[in-house]
Image (spheres, grey):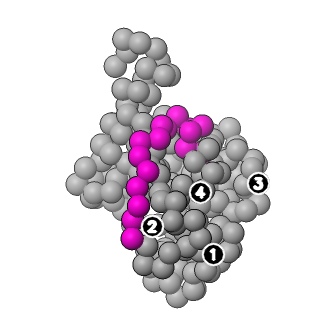
Amino acid sequence: MDVFLTTERLSLRALTPADLPQVYALDSDPEVMRHLNGGRPTTPQAVREEVLPLLTRTVPCLGHPGFWAAEERATGSFLGWFEFRPPSDEDATVVELGYRLNRSAWGRGYATEGSRALVRKGFTELRVERVFATTMTVNSRSRRVMEKAGLRHVRTFFDDWPDPVEGAEHGDVQYALTREEWQRDHLGPGVG
């Protein structure tokens, strides 16, 4: 299996249909899904017919998928997945960062470790110009990961949720980081 990225503790690889049981378990956990859909588990049929095809799809402007299975290097355990893909199939210079990890992986720094590594790879190898991420305003854990990954709060906004979940009345937030900002923060002034 091709590895897209490794960190000290993580290995990120393309998701495959063989990951169906792990993805289903992830999307069935009410706590994992709390800030996404109010905690409703995703049905096995929806995971098979909608979620997994999205996670395994090759993004045309990238030539590879935009979602990556996260495994613990020491054990090979499936921890969840990371997203690093453009919102448009035609432009790979702007990408969205996302992550969904099993509860057993929470609070151990995996989301921050993987996010930082993806941001670095995006700006140093993939010609990314801007990385952004969004979450509910009330999702303080996810917001903290974004901040630790170097992204900065850009805006708070209010979308129409088809089925509003608890906390939706506080809106959503977007965080972002440009290549120029990242280079200044990580490589010093005058680089770029």
Q: Is residue 7 left or right of residue 163?
A: right
Q: Which residue is mark 2?
A: 56
Q: Tell us which disc is closer to us: 3 or 1.
A: 1
Instruction: Give the structural element (helix, strand or loop) at label 3.
Output: loop
Instruction: Give the structural element (helix, strand or loop) at label 2.
Output: helix
Q: Which residue is mark 3?
A: 75
Disc 2 or 1, which lies upstream in sequence? 1
Q: Residue at x 60, y 37 (%)?
A: 148
Q: Quadrant of residue 115?
A: top right
- Mark sitting on residue 177: none
Image x and y of residue 30, in percent:
67, 74
Crowd around label 4: few <14 · some 14–19 · many ≥20 (10 Å) = some
Residue type (three-letter) at the residue carrying disc 2 = Thr
Label 3, label 1: how far apart the Cα atoms are: 28 Å
Q: Which residue is mark 4?
A: 138
Vertical placement of residue 31 versus 50, above or below: above
Crowd around label 3: few <14 · some 14–19 · many ≥20 (10 Å) = few
Label 2, label 3: how far apart the Cα atoms are: 23 Å
Disc 4 or 2, which lies upstream in sequence? 2
Q: Which residue is mark 1?
A: 39
Q: Are marks 4 and 2 in contact (CB under 8 Å)?
A: no
Vertical placement of residue 146 versus 38, above or below: above
User: Which residues make up the magenta segment?
Assistant: 145-160
Image x and y of residue 186, in percent:
50, 22
Q: Residue at x 22, y 54 (%)?
A: 90
Q: Is residue 153 magenta?
A: yes
Instruction: Give the structural element (helix, strand or loop) at label 4.
Output: loop
Residue type (three-letter) at the residue carrying disc 4 = Val
